[in-house]
Amino acid sequence: MAFMFLRETIRTYRERDPAARSTLEVILCYPGVHAVIWHKLSHFLWQNKFYLLGRFSSHIARWLTGIEIHPAAKLGRRLVIDHGMGVVIGETAVIGDDCYLYHQVTLGVARTMGGKRHPTIGNNVIIGAGAKVLGPITVGDNARVGSNAVVVDAVPADTTVVGIPARPVDRSLKHRKQDFDPYGMPCDDSIDPLLKDLEGLRAELSDLEVRIGRLSSAPGQTRQTSAAPAIPRQTAAE
């Protein structure tokens, strides 16, 4: 079972990362692989109520890889953590199968509370570098979270979100679920919601200038000037 897990993980890295030139390179030089292997041990200890040993094991993994995964977190199959430095996955986080996380991703809490505090990530989800997914929310299957986005609300399946706070963009993934979007960002620049708003304001301003120009040049709209009434001179009586 452990051999099958390692083999399919290495195969996934080689398929998705063009820089991975060999199986040995992935085994020796990819901290994401090391972190997931260490988590297997930490999670086993945690499930068997060796809580301190589980935390200590995850602490060693963090020191070696720069990736912090709580031993109670649940990770799906074929998880890829690319680059990895600064990734934080909290205690009650759940990650589905075939997900792809970049460096400095945080699956954290939005507020201090008990129970479920961290996100649940569906299958085939890509989360870009620096993104923060906070609170007990759900990110649906095939969703994309753009780099540096801050997600505090649930993300429906087949949806891409970007920005702070993260907002959906006009882009359907239903016809291209197998495509891979590096850093969770589509290549089409027009999907940036802030850029769309700015372009809309610019178009409205241009239209307003044209309308004002037409009104000012229309016949019968000449400016009328009124002469000031003359003030009669008063002569002083002698």
Image: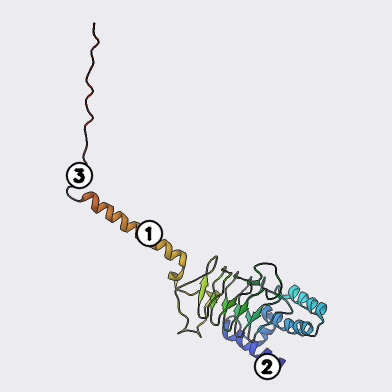
Place of residue 151 in the rendered image (x, y in percent of width and height, measured from the top left): 58, 70
Q: Are marks 1 and 3 in contact (CB under 8 Å)?
A: no
Badge 2 element: helix
Q: Nearer the viewer, residue 186 or 51?
A: 51
Give the residue at mark 3.
222
Give how far apart the Cα atoms at labels 3 and 2 are: 85 Å
What residue is shown at x 31% (from left), y 58% (from top)?
Answer: 207
Quarter containing the N terminus: bottom right
Other residues around mark 1 within 10 Å, as few (<14) / some (14–19) / many (≥20): few
On the picture, is 187 further left or further right than 124? left
What residue is shown at x 24% (from left), y 53% (from top)?
Answer: 214
Badge 1 element: helix
Colouring chosen for the image of the structure: rainbow
Place of residue 25 in the rendered image (x, y in percent of width and height, measured from the top left): 66, 83
Q: Earlier in the sequence, mark 1 or mark 3?
A: 1
On the picture, is 125 further left or further right than 201? right
Badge 3 element: loop
Q: What amino acid type should be assigned to the residue bearing mark 2?
A: Met
Q: What amino acid type should be assigned to the residue bearing mark 3?
A: Thr
Other residues around mark 3 within 10 Å, as few (<14) / some (14–19) / many (≥20): few
- Seen in the picture, residue 177 relative to 237 is either above or below; the reply is below
Give the residue at mark 2.
4
Quarter containing the C terminus: top left
Q: Earlier in the sequence, mark 3 or mark 2?
A: 2
What residue is shown at x 28% (from left), y 56% (from top)?
Answer: 210
In the picture, the disc for residue 202 is: 1
**Camera-nearest label, 1 or 3:** 3
Other residues around mark 2 within 10 Å, as few (<14) / some (14–19) / many (≥20): few
Give how far apart the Cα atoms at labels 1 and 3 are: 29 Å
Q: What amino acid type should be assigned to the residue bearing mark 1?
A: Arg
Place of residue 19 in the rendered image (x, y in percent of width and height, measured from the top left): 59, 80
Q: Earlier in the sequence, mark 1 or mark 2?
A: 2
